[in-house]
Amino acid sequence: MRIAEERGSGVVVVAPGGRVDSVTSSALEAKLLGHVRSGDTRLVIDLEAVDYISSAGLRILLRVANELRPMGGTLVLCAMAESVREVFELAGFTALFSIETSRDRAVARARAEA
């Protein structure tokens, strides 16, 4: 898995690519929790390049959202492939996250919600 990131206007965008599963999810977790612990409270996770996500990946996203909540932070997911969205829907996670169709919309929502 590769992880790209960019920062702008108070929002950090993290864009993993490839598979997010039990083997690779620890790297994503370290990256995201590192941002939260350094005070970044507006995060966007761009899932456009993710072709598979397992329950381990879902668990990490839930943990990050729970860490942000008491800080008044926000986490917005975006650009999910249909196969990734299906995993979120089957797990009942679409109701737990703010999800947008594009990165631009997700960044705008993260700015507005914080």
Image (tube, helix red, strand yellow):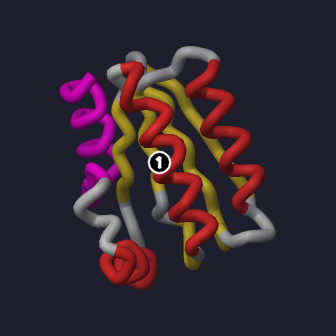
Residue 6 picture quarter: top right
Q: Measured from the top left, where is residue 107 in percent x and y?
A: 32, 36
Furthest-left residue in this view? 112
Which amino acid, by three-letter code, is at mark 1?
Answer: Ile
- Could you tell me what secondary structure mostly forms the magenta stretch? helix
**Mark 1, residue position:** 45
Residue 106 sits inside the magenta stretch = yes
Q: Quadrant of the C terminus?
A: top left
Residue 81 picture quarter: bottom left
Furthest-right residue in this view? 23
**What range of the chain is rendered magenta?**
97-114
Q: Is residue 108 left or right of residue 56?
A: left
Label 1: which secondary element: strand
Identify the residue shown where x is 40% and y is 27%: 42
Identify the residue shown where x is 38% and y is 52%: 77
Is residue 28 shown above or below 21?
above
Identify the residue shown where x is 22% and y is 28%: 113
Q: Measured from the top left, where is residue 32 in percent x and y?
A: 61, 39
